[in-house]
Image (cartoon, rainbow, N blue to C red):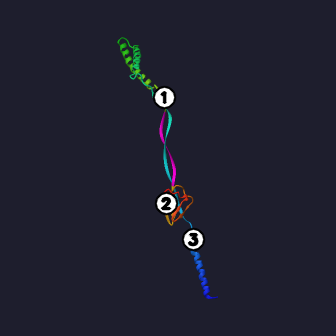
Amino acid sequence: MNKPIVIGGVIAALGIAGGIAVGSYQSSESGPRYAEIVSVEPIVQTTNTPREVCKNVTVTHQRPVKDENRIAGTAIGAIVGGVVGNQFGGGSGKKIMTAAGAVGGGVAGNQVQQQMQQGDTYQTTEQRCSTVNDSKDETVGYDVRYRYDGEVHEAKLDEKPDGDRVLMRDGNPQWDGDSRSS
């Protein structure tokens, strides 16, 4: 065999093998690239909704007083006390006992009427209302951190990403439906 033909054949074979190696290397670079999702944190928003709550309560009221100075109780007490005081003593002592009984009875009658007026109550059922807040936590998005080419990046998404990686195109993540909120 001719030596130049063998050398040419070897060089051609090496060239073809090298072309195949370079081509396969370039095609692996042009294939899909992915970034690793490092963390997904929900963005939670709390909303307060006011509402009115009403309930029936029993309320005790004092009846209006007709005799604020308690004259009736004082007069009746004085009369009864005077009659009782008149039963004791003799002569001028009877007059003193009658007067003392009238004064003591008047004071006692006044106090009895006061106690009766304070105890004269009635009850009603009334509706009492107040405003309360109902709190509700709602997930409004997600803070996502991903690693691409050794660097960690962040994105805010409306929806939680599926899986643990994201397809990259021209250095940008391609989220499902590309639902980026910012």
Identity of the residue drawn at 59% across and 80% down: 14
From this view, report whether residue 123 is shown above or below residue 137.
Answer: above
Identity of the residue drawn at 58% across and 79% down: 15
Residue found farthest to the bottom: 2
Crowdedness of circle 3 by 10 Å Cα count: few (<14), some, many (20+)?
few
As measured in the structure, the alpha-carbon distance from the residue carrying label 2 to the one carrying label 3 is: 29 Å
Q: Secondary structure at mark 1?
A: strand
Query: What type of secondary structure mainly makes up the magenta span?
Result: strand
Q: Earlier in the sequence, mark 1 or mark 2?
A: 1
Residue assigned mark 3? 27
Identified by mark 3, the residue type is: Ser
Q: Position of residue 34 (x, y in %)?
A: 55, 64
Identified by mark 1, the residue type is: Gln
As measured in the structure, the alpha-carbon distance from the residue carrying label 3 to the one carrying label 1 is: 91 Å
Q: Secondary structure at mark 3?
A: helix
Q: Secondary structure at mark 2?
A: strand
Identity of the residue drawn at 50% across and 38% down: 53
Q: Where does the magenta region start and end?
A: 127-141
Q: Nearer the viewer, residue 107 or 25?
A: 25
Residue assigned mark 2? 154
Residue found farthest to the right: 1
Residue 53: which disc?
none
Residue assigned mark 1? 123
Q: Quadrant of residue 11?
A: bottom right
Q: Nearer the viewer, residue 47 or 128?
A: 47
